[in-house]
Image (tube, helix red, strand yellow):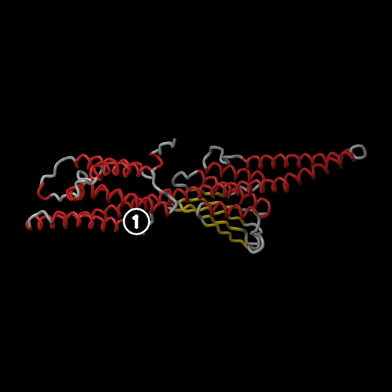
């Protein structure tokens, strides 16, 4: 026993309900007598049975049209999706059912045009544009042919005046029917195009989300590698030197206690430096480097740390007109931190200036020192500079660095803020 087809699998369940509502309403209207009986064409069913009263098929024609209508309505539950041959067979069966209902169903004659509209609607759901145009044109042609056939049957029974009026009625109904088919076709094309656009947008958003996750993972990996290198270069060096100082102090402890004490003092300094390196590494790995403080205060803390380490107090000026998003705050903090670290390690500067300001649509960060500088073509491949540049580009900004031997270094970061206003 086959399971019933769930309606929710239909691409447009509301459209299926609309089809059934339309069929139900027009079927009810079919049982209401038309206002102009003398203009009503004689159905093909009555003509055949009137000419051949002994035909056994005459007794089943009404039931056949009713069954055909029920089958036609039920076919909307399951639409062919992939196989082109199944789509053609499906549409052909629908056309045959419509012809049976229109030609042999006396009461359903007024339902006839609406069935073609439903046929065009369904064809839009299963065929591409060429198939939709073909089914729409075929529906209009079949409507004209069947209408003309009924007119010929009516032509033998009506007066010339009635024939003229009925011909005018056919012309008007054909024009209205053709325009209705075109309207349905255009409307369905618009609905399907909008749906396809939304599906493509959803797919693009999903791909973008995956790419963002990949970029985030890659950035995390690079950050971990940088921290590992920092620990190896700073903490590893300090601990190695500390170990050498302690070994020397132990060797001299008996022979020369005074000199051994000097080595122990040096070892203590190296231990303090190693502890500082560990704290810096832990601080770098924190999820929120600003620790719930404002960007101004975080940069002031970096300046104070720089002053304690190097004896130089950076001159900084900060002018933020409005709060910035967390991702921009974090990026500016990291860029400032990396810049001050590089100055501390390599620049041998005696003056450091930092400026941070925002306008309506732009943020600018400038960090400048009067250190020894470097050749731009030789010293721009380090991880620190790459990290600062990547953080800036990730926010759609521009990263520039100007330096020359003996002329210090100037880093300029511009980040657009138009999306925030």
Q: Which residue is mark 1?
A: 132
- The residue carrying pointer 1 sits among few (fewer than 14), some (14 to 19) or many (20 or more) residues within 10 Å by Cα, namely many
Could you tell me if residue 262 is visible in this image? no
Which is nearer the eye, 179 or 317?
Answer: 179
Residue 377 in the image: state x and y as whole percent.
64, 64
Horizontal side of 256 relative to 313 (left or right) equals right
Mark 1, secondary structure of its residue: helix
Horizontal side of 337 relative to 259 (left or right) equals left
- Picture residue at 67% right of the left edge, 39% below the top: 279
Could you tell me if residue 338 is visible in this image? yes
In the rendered image, the residue lying farthest to the front is 54
The N terminus - image quarter = top left
- Picture residue at 37% right of the left edge, 42% below the top: 77
Residue 174 in the image: state x and y as whole percent.
20, 56
- Picture residue at 19% right of the left edge, 42% below the top: 30
- Mark count: 1
Which is nearer the eye, 257 or 329?
Answer: 329
Residue 333 in the image: state x and y as whole percent.
56, 46
Q: Image quadrant of residue 407? A: bottom right
Which is nearer the eye, 179 or 281?
Answer: 179
Residue 392 in the image: state x and y as whole percent.
54, 53
């Amino acid at each position: 026993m086959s399971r019933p087809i769930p309606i929710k699998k239909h691409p447009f369940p509301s459209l299926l309900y609309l089809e059934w509502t339309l069929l139900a309403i027009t079927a009810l209207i079919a049982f209401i007598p038309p206002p102009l009986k003398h203009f009503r064409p004689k159905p093909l069913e009555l003509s055949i049975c009137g000419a051949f009263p002994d035909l056994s098929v005459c007794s089943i024609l009404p039931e056949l049209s009713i069954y055909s209508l029920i089958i036609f309505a039920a076919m909307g539950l399951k639409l062919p999706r992939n196989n082109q041959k199944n789509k053609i067979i499906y549409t052909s069966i629908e056309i045959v059912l419509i012809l049976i209902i229109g030609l042999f169903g006396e009461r359903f004659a007024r339902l006839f045009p609406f069935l073609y509209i439903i046929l065009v609607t369904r064809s839009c759901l299963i065929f591409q544009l060429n198939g939709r145009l073909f089914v729409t044109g075929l529906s209009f042609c079949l409507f004209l042919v069947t209408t003309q056939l009924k007119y010929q049957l009516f032509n033998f029974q009506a007066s010339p005046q009635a024939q003229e009026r009925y011909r005018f009625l056919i012309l008007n109904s054909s024009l209205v029917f053709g325009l209705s088919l075109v309207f349905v076709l255009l409307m369905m094309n618009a609905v399907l195009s909008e749906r396809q656009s939304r599906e493509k947008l959803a797919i693009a958003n999903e791909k973008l989300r995956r790419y963002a996750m990949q970029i985030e993972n890659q950035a995390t990996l690079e950050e971990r590698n940088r921290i590992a290198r920092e620990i190896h270069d700073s903490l590893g060096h300090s601990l190695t030197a500390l170990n050498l100082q302690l070994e020397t102090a132990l060797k001299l402890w008996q022979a020369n206690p005074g000199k051994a004490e000097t080595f122990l003092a040096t070892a203590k300094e190296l231990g303090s430096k190693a502890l500082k390196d560990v704290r810096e590494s832990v601080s770098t790995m924190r999820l929120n480097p600003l620790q719930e403080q404002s960007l101004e205060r975080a940069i002031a803390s970096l300046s104070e740390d720089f002053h304690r380490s190097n004896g130089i107090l950076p001159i900084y000026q900060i002018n933020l007109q409005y709060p910035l998003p967390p991702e921009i705050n974090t990026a500016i903090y990291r860029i400032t931190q990396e810049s001050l670290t590089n100055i501390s390690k390599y620049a041998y500067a005696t003056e450091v200036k930092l400026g941070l300001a925002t306008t309506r649509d732009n943020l600018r960060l400038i960090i400048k020192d009067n250190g020894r500088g470097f050749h731009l073509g030789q010293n721009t491949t380090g991880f620190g500079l790459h990290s600062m540049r990547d953080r800036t580009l990730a926010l759609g900004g521009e990263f520039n660095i100007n330096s020359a031997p003996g002329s210090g270094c100037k880093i300029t970061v511009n980040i657009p803020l138009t999306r925030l206003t």
